[in-house]
Image (cartoon, rainbow, N blue to C red):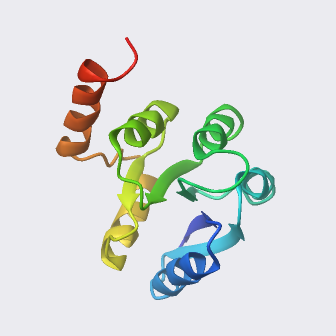
């Protein structure tokens, strides 16, 4: 069985450990590396070429949207899932525009993360109708014109 390879990026060691604990329970997904910031993420993406990048939205150093922009330009085969505690329309819109496949709340259950990784690795975009509607409303009412 070919495993889905994952690079997990978060500046909180406990968050990384939690993601690793969840993913080690499934046979078809393997964490092949971890990074604590955007610069380290780019280095690891270049070295490891994961299928899926699990990317924390808020980290010190290079912001997530810049990591995603670099990834789209240099490694377009890598799909990104944002994991965040920041469920704000601005961030959601920014990351959708950057090209991520999904925007998941860190309060999601392990099964949701596993399903999202599998679906994103198969090429799906995982934005809910509610997320798409929020971004459209934000752009119309508040966002840049």
Residue 62, located in which quarter of the rendered image? Answer: top right
- In the rendering, at what x and y percent does residue 49 appear? 70, 55
Quarter of the image that includes the C terminus: top left
Which residue is at a point 31% across and 76% down the rendered structure image?
Answer: 109
Which residue is at a point 39% across and 34% down the rendered structure image?
Answer: 93
When the figure is inspected, residue 133 is found, relative to residue 45, above or below; the finding is above
When the figure is inspected, residue 90 is found, relative to residue 119, above or below; the finding is above
Whether residue 119 can be seen here: no
Whether residue 125 can be seen here: yes
Of residues 112 and 76, which is closer to you in this image?
A: 112
Residue 129, located in which quarter of the rendered image? Answer: top left
- In the rendering, at what x and y percent does residue 144 appear? 40, 17
Q: Is residue 1 left or right of residue 68?
A: left
In this view, the residue farthest toward the top is 145
Of residues 89 and 44, which is closer to you in this image?
A: 89
Of residues 111 and 56, which is closer to you in this image?
A: 56
């Amino acid at each position: 069985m070919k495993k889905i390879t994952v690079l997990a990026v978060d500046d909180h060691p406990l968050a990384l450990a939690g993601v690793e604990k969840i993913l080690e329970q499934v046979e078809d997904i393997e964490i092949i590396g971890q990074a604590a910031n955007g610069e380290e993420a780019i280095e690891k993406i270049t070295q490891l070429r994961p299928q899926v990048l699990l990317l924390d939205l808020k980290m010190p150093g290079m912001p997530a949207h810049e990591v995603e922009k670099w990834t789209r330009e240099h490694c377009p085969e890598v799909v990104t899932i944002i994991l965040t505690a920041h469920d704000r329309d601005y961030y959601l819109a920014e990351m959708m525009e950057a090209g991520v496949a999904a925007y998941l709340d860190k309060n999601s259950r392990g099964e949701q993360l596993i399903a999202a990784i599998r679906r994103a690795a198969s090429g799906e975009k995982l934005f809910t109708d509610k997320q798409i509607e929020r971004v459209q409303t934000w752009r119309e009412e508040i966002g840049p014109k």
